[in-house]
Image (cartoon, rainbow, N blue to C red):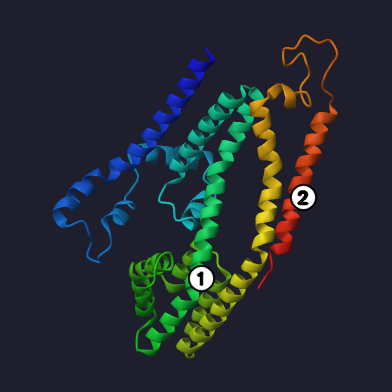
């Protein structure tokens, strides 16, 4: 019976994942067929796959979006998805979260055969998509900051050559790699659609919360209000940003060992504990479970409440040590 339940759960996860996939693909099927006859690229020379990913949501997604808006479940999730550059809607993200919860819970129950780990799998599956978004945001922001110095210098050179601000930003969008090229093209496109400059740059800062980018936007806004040589200002800002990126790279090299040690020391006890419990549940279970709960025939209890206290103190110590190490190696520049 347990195997039947596990198989049904896995089938449910597969059906949900397939439904989300085809709900996304259904919006672009007609566009992909038309691209076979028009060459597969727009007038700007961009790939058609990027264009089709920005099409409107399907009817199923629209209904889910409406329910989420009525329940107030969206919150700032749309902004988080934009910062991670994920071309999915809030409704699709919650559908993937549900799939992750069911999949991780089924896997944990299949390994440990315990309701406690089933609940733990549900909690872990709920946070896994959010953790993925945070990691993607951090990686994208670091890449953007590394490219920003060169992008600002390219803007300054364009302004000296006689370009306007939008033409200089468009040149960055064409010459620089992603993600800076994508963000600059979005700003130029928004201003071309009639959005004022302040609103377009605020949207850029909302998608890319970078202190260096905030410095550039502030300089542009001040120059538009009081005047001045914008090319010279941007050249100085670009030099400062490049030096900051260089110093950050040196600090990251010097603190790499401490950062890796923090991850290994924090994760090793947890991973070993889970592996040992999966291989020999009776051996580890004596610390936290009573004999009766494991189905043993002994009359003397083989577990003490201090087992849970020991686990709690150990997790608290691991978390405290991890955050202490991260605080030490986090050096502001």
Q: Quadrant of residue 179?
A: bottom left
Where residue 234 sits in the image (x, y, percent)? 49, 83
Q: Is residue 327 visible?
A: yes
Whether label 1 touches label 2, CB < 8 Å: no
SS label for mark 1: helix
Badge 1 is on which residue? 146
Badge 2 is on which residue? 320
For disc 1, the neighbor class at 10 Å (few under 14, some 14 to 19, many from 20) is some
Left or right, 146 with reference to 34: right
Q: Name the residue rendered at 31%, 50% in the picture.
A: 55
Where residue 130 sits in the image (x, y, percent)? 55, 46
Left or right, 217 with reference to 16: right
Where residue 107 sits in the image (x, y, percent)? 54, 29
SS label for mark 2: helix
For disc 2, the neighbor class at 10 Å (few under 14, some 14 to 19, many from 20) is few
Q: Which quadrant of the figure contains the C terminus?
A: bottom right
Q: Name the residue rendered at 78%, 16% in the picture.
A: 291
Q: Name the residue rendered at 41%, 31% in the picture.
A: 16
- How many marks on residues? 2
Label 1 to label 2, Cα distance in Å? Answer: 31 Å
Q: Name the residue rendered at 75%, 41% in the picture.
A: 315
Q: Quadrant of residue 92?
A: top left
Instruction: Establish if 180 lies above or below 128.
Output: below
Q: Earlier in the sequence, mark 1 or mark 2?
A: 1
């Amino acid at each position: 019976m347990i195997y039947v339940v596990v198989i049904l759960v896995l089938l449910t996860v597969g059906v949900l994942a397939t439904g989300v996939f085809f709900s996304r693909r259904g919006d672009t099927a007609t566009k992909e067929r038309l691209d076979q006859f028009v060459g597969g690229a727009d007038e700007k020379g961009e790939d058609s796959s990027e264009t089709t990913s920005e099409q409107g949501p399907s009817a199923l997604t629209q209904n889910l979006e409406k329910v989420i808006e009525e329940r107030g479940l969206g919150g700032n999730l749309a902004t988080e998805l934009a910062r991670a550059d994920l071309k999915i809607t809030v409704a699709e993200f919650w559908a993937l979260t549900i799939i992750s919860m069911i999949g991780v819970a089924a896997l944990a129950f299949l390994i440990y055969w315990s309701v406690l780990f089933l609940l733990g799998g549900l909690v872990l599956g709920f946070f896994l998509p959010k953790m993925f978004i945070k990691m993607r945001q951090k990686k994208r922001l670091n890449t953007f900051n590394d490219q920003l110095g060169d992008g600002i210098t390219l803007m300054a050179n364009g302004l000296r050559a006689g370009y306007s601000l939008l033409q200089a930003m468009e040149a960055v969008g064409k010459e620089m790699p992603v993600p800076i090229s994508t963000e600059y093209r979005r700003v130029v496109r928004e201003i071309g659609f009639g959005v004022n400059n302040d609103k377009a740059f605020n949207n850029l800062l909302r998608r890319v919360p970078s202190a260096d980018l905030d410095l550039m936007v502030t300089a542009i806004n001040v120059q538009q209000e009081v005047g001045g040589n914008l090319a010279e200002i941007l050249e100085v800002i670009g030099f400062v940003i490049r030096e900051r990126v260089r110093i950050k790279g040196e600090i990251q090299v010097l603190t790499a060992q401490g950062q890796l040690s923090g991850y290994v020391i924090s994760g090793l006890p947890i991973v070993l504990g889970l592996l040992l419990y999966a291989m020999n549940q009776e051996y580890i279970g004596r610390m936290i479970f009573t004999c009766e709960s494991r189905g043993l025939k002994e009359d003397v209890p083989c577990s003490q409440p201090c087992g849970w206290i020991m686990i709690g103190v150990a997790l608290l110590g691991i978390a405290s040590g991890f955050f202490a190490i991260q605080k030490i190696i986090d050096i502001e520049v």
